Amino acid sequence: MRSRSQAAWEELTAEATAIVDDAGRHGVTLRVMGSAGIRLHCRPPGRLMDALGRPAKDIDLVVRDKDRKKMRRFLEERGYVTDRDVLIAMEGTRYSFTHSRRGTQIDVFAQRLDFCHTIDVRDRLRRHPVTLPVEELMLGKLQIVEMTMTDVIDVGVILGTHRVRRVNAQLLASDTGPFDPEAIDGMHIAGLLARDWGFHHTVTMNLRRVGDLVGSGGCVDLGPEPNVRVADGVARLLRFIDDVPKSLAWRMRDKIGERKQWWQDVDEKEATY
């Protein structure tokens, strides 16, 4: 028998998938991010999220810059009402909608995820037919300076169901087996962080936190096999991130360290997704 949480997730993800598919037929490129994106990316994360009772929230989407006007018209025709206060305050970089009958909430971001750190996804939108790539789904959680337990759960679920590998370069000697399209590209993440000390600092701190909290002795127990995969994934990612040469800007910022704030301030509405 389905739980109330599972039923809520099914309703939310069905709507998110329908929106992405229908928008594509109208020439609008949308992709799902956030917790719904993690759940929709592939089947295994959903089972772990259900086991942990991860609650369903709203739908978070990313749109191409050039599709913003068509996106707004498309959603309004589906019964969603635009939050004009958010539209004005965010100057078209973010939109918020609420369905007039069902009350479903949707937030849409234009190409860039601007929170504690900025993640530009304009060249990554077509790598998966429904969601952002798994790397950006995870970075969207790891960039949060003050991660909540639900954020920790979401990162743990990703690492518990996806192996970290060197996807876009020669495989490590230890990376045996066939190519895995669901593998997390450790080199892509390491390359992004090698150019931005602040982003690097936040992500590496949060990865270590996930490693401490997820496991049989931590606050989040995913089960024997996923726990092992999380520990292995955290170790592999930290090794990739540490090994990649850093930019001059990164090295100069490293000299200042935590004496200067390294993240962008965001209000509660902006930070929650």
Image (cartoon, grey):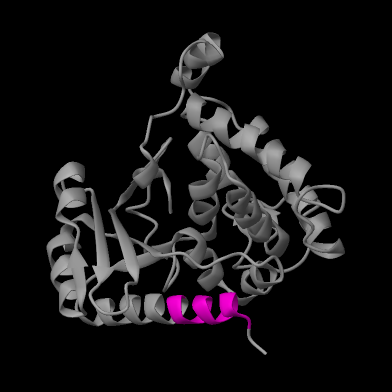
- Choose between 13 and 64: the one closer to the eye: 13
**Which quarter of the figure has residue 176?**
bottom right
| Residue 103, x across and y down, in percent | 32, 72
What type of secondary structure mainly makes up the magenta span?
A: helix
> What is the span of residues highlighted in magenta in the rendered image?
3-12
What is the count of numbered marks? Answer: 0
Q: Quadrant of the C terminus?
A: bottom left
| Residue 84, x across and y down, in percent | 14, 54
Lateral position of residue 224 relative to residue 209, left or right: right
Lateral position of residue 217 relative to residue 127, left or right: right
**Which quarter of the figure has residue 61?**
bottom left
| Residue 90, x across and y down, in percent | 21, 44
Would residue 179 be visible to someone looking at this image? no
| Residue at the image position 27 percent from the left and 77 percent from the top | 24
Would residue 72 be visible to someone looking at this image? yes
- Choose between 6 and 65: the one closer to the eye: 6
Lateral position of residue 267 relative to residue 81, left or right: right
| Residue at the image position 19 percent from the left and 58 percent from the top | 83
Vertical comparison of 4 with 157: above or below = below
| Residue at the image position 50 percent from the left and 56 percent from the top | 137
Vertical comparison of 224 with 250: above or below = below
- Choose between 200 and 205: the one closer to the eye: 205
| Residue 48, x across and y down, in percent | 69, 69
Q: Quadrant of the N terminus?
A: bottom right
Vertical comparison of 273 with 208: above or below = below
Point out the residue furthest to the bottom here. 1
Magenta residue check for 181? no
